[in-house]
Image (cartoon, rainbow, N blue to C red):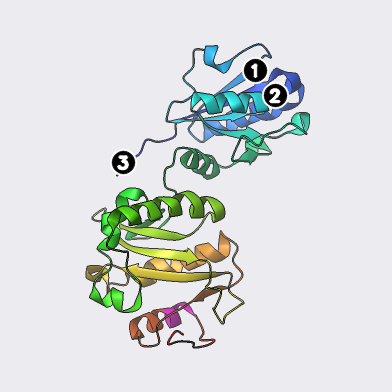
Amino acid sequence: MMHSMMNRIYILLDERWQGTSLPEAAEAVRAYKGYGFDTDLWIIESGDRLADAGIDWSERDTLCVADSARLLTELLVCGAAYCAFSHAGNRGEDLHAADYVLMELPWVDRDSLVKIWQRQRDLPWTILETDRCIVREFVPEDLDAIYDLYDSEARRFLEAPCSDRNKEREILRSYIRRVYRLGGYGDWAVISKETGELIGRMGYSFPSSSSPDSISEVSFGYLLRSDWRGKGIAREVGADILAYGFTMLGFAAIGADADVSNAASDKILHYFGFLPVAEEKDQR
């Protein structure tokens, strides 16, 4: 699955407060060019309309940064990928039209800019890479490969997707749209670098309300396709995902559930350092 890359950034400043915003924006231009982005700075006068500028703001490889409600609204109408810039000059300006608001513009790192662009373009975030795998967010096109994960052994312990694939496709689309955007984490796709195939799912979910472990902020879970089990993938990927949870997502405690008869899962969780805290309804 191929996606376009982000290559260009436009920083659009309302003329009303350019005295305050311009030095910071100019510094950001230098920083973003250092990241490898083609970056331009525009001062937009009150009578100017973005639609008349002769620029296709909606180009798929472009992220626009604007500092006024008017400019954000025009970018929305143009179909642009955009975010807002908050600074000392525009305090009190209504920037709610943007999903993301940036402060201290020159210090925004490359990865954050790309992730904002990806959200705006409905593209999946790459979470991390290990020696053999890439962990990324799911996309609707993964549906058939998700079904392939649930062989008879997996179905012993996990609820499989329903037989109605159209229904499951809508569930997946809703999950992608809501869960990833809400928390910035969730259940992720595990992709083999060697084959490019989806070979598993791994990540975090909110703990069950009936969970006896009230300390955990999230619940860790995983599933690998049958032909990839027993090859150390769960340990390789799981270790990095758990480290990501503590260091990047800031979790203080992570829980997990396993069927008491699932010896393989019990062994993996003990390897990661999980400690049994309770058993309830055949779940440890």
Residue neighbourhood size for the residue with mark 1, other residues' Cα within 10 Å, grouped as few (<14), some (14–19), many (≥20): some
Instruction: Verify CB contact (< 8 Å) between mark 2 and mark 3.
Output: no
Instruction: Tell me which numbered mark, 2 or 1, is placed earlier along the sequence.
Output: 2
Q: Nearer the viewer, residue 161 or 54?
A: 161
Residue 123 in sight: yes
Residue type at mark 2 is Leu
Q: What residue is pinned by disc 2?
A: 22
Residue sitting at x 27%, y 58%: 145
Q: CA distance from mark 2 to mark 1?
A: 9 Å
Instruction: Tell me which numbered mark, 2 or 3, is placed earlier along the sequence.
Output: 3
Position of the N terminus by quadrant: top left
| Disc 2, SS | helix
Dot label at residue 43? 1
Instruction: Verify CB contact (< 8 Å) between mark 1 and mark 3.
Output: no
Instruction: Verify CB contact (< 8 Å) between mark 2 and mark 1.
Output: yes
Dot label at residue 2? 3
Give the magenta range. Answer: 269-273
Residue neighbourhood size for the residue with mark 2, other residues' Cα within 10 Å, grouped as few (<14), some (14–19), many (≥20): some
| Disc 3, SS | loop
Is residue 67 within the magenta segment?
A: no
Residue type at mark 1 is Ile
